[in-house]
Amino acid sequence: MDILHDHNNKVTVPISQVLSENIDVLECLFINCADVIKQKITIGGANKVEIYFIYIDNMIDKKLLEEDTLRYLKYHMDDLPESGQFDYIKDKGLRTADLGDLITMDKVIESILAGDTVIFVEGSDKAIKVSIRGMANRGVPQAENEVTVRGSKEAFSEVLFINRVLLRRRIKDTKFKIKQMKVGTRTKTDVAICYLEDVAKPEVVNDIEKRLKNFVIDGIFDSGMIEQLTEREHYSPFPEFQATERPDKAASAITEGRVVVIVDNSPMVLLLPTTLNAFFQASDDAYNRWEVATFSRVLRYIAAFLAVALPGLYLAVLNFESELLSSSLSLSFAAAREGVPFSALVEVIIMEIAFELLLEAGIRLPGPMGNTIGIVGGLIIGDAAVAANLVSPMIVIIVALTAISAFTVPNESFANAFRLVRYIIIFLSAWLGLYGFSIGVLLFLIHLCGLKSFGTPYLLPYVASNINGGNELKDAILKEPATKLKVRPTFARKQQRKRLRMDK
């Protein structure tokens, strides 16, 4: 059979009143699809009619289909009228609340692939969509990457409707809107845009919608693909979206006026707009006292600086500015490097690459083995390298401290950007000393100053802090008490900036 397709791979033929023609179309489309289940039965008493079921195995609740739907249609349709059989079957024979009419084959295909059951009735140019989905999923998992001592332990799953429920359960407001669309001509992946209608800026919501419609791709399999296809600064290592696995963090972002993008089959959702400051905030900062949160944030900022600058600063001082060190420290450094055949730069690169290899191996290996290779491998390689005089003990300490510092940044994507910038500063420092180090840091800051995430300056509130009357600085490096945080960030509309009112 000749079936016409448009550029989006949708079948454009309408549903026929002749059941055999519809069956031929579906048989042609789903040839060699072992997971597609098709069944034709005859129902009715005096007025019999053939109906045709089609669905994908293990994507529906099979028990509900067989015991509730099929059995009822087989044994309780004796009063089937001679005319109007489609409406009678839909109204009297199907006891499922979620039903719908389909009039074109492209909608039929879309519904089947989404996990619905579709029923054709002989003599009708419409089909019935029955939503009795029962796909296997792991429910609501526990957060593994963004672990907190205090607060919710729940994490997003790979199933979009579960993730929607996790947000809806936390934001019980009719202004909480969820727009949904399909992306990918082959995968037809569901993508949901979640926001508070009266708080989020309309231009931000419209911008992300426009960006999602600006490209045509065959398949989307994770939110990371959406992130890369919709960002503006493709050559920047710093992300324009903030990814999170925590529903409480996403819900908090929505109440601030930000937008959340959920992608089906991905356990990570995207928050936008974002700023550098947002990447340094952990979920439990909001649940702990302001003194504890402030102390933790100061540590994170110090650790981020060390993760970027420590190896480069060491090379610059050791090779060019050793007079800045005390005599005893200079002698200690010199004694530690005695017998090492390589320059300090080569030492740093050797240890950095060794650590990157251990990190990659630890990620790829199964859980217990990954932890073992990270700890044992690091100890053995570091000790063996020092014993063989390949590197000095000081380099091992510098690289280890740098690695630990990078892990204190709460967001992995942001921490990875710091890892890349670190190598640039290492080479500039080894080449030009403190001048190279200063140039690297300045280029790093200039780049950050030029970045924007959906119109929001990346360095807010450290630049343009007057946008919101300086209120952003109350929840930056230093966090003020919760009673002082009365204003939403600049992500929200001006009319909805007030978030807390205290009775005197």
Image: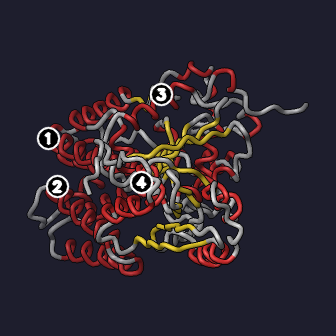
The disc, 4 or 3, on the residue closer to the chain's N-terminal end is 4
Labelled disc at residue 344 = 2
Distance Cα–Cα, label 2 vs label 3: 41 Å
Q: Secondary structure at mark 2?
A: helix
- Quarter holding the N terminus is bottom left
Distance Cα–Cα, label 4 vs label 3: 21 Å
Give amino acid for label 2. Ala
Give amino acid for label 3. Thr
User: To which residue does mark 1 refer?
Assistant: 431
- Left or right: 428 as drawn, with respect to 246: left
Distance Cα–Cα, label 4 vs label 2: 29 Å
Q: Is residue 283 above or below residue 397?
A: above
Q: Secondary structure at mark 1?
A: helix
The disc, 1 or 4, on the residue closer to the chain's N-terminal end is 4
The image quadrant of residue 486 is top right
The image quadrant of residue 148 is bottom right
- Few, some or many C-alpha atoms within 10 Å of disc 3 (few <14, some 14-19, many ≥20)? some
Labelled disc at residue 456 = 3
Give amino acid for label 4. Glu
User: To which residue does mark 4 refer?
Assistant: 412
Distance Cα–Cα, label 1 vs label 2: 12 Å
- The mark lying in front, picked from 4 and 3, is 3
The image quadrant of residue 442 is top left
Residue at 57 percent across and 50 percent down: it is 101
Which sits in the foreground, 481 or 263? Answer: 263
Residue at 69 percent across and 26 percent down: it is 496
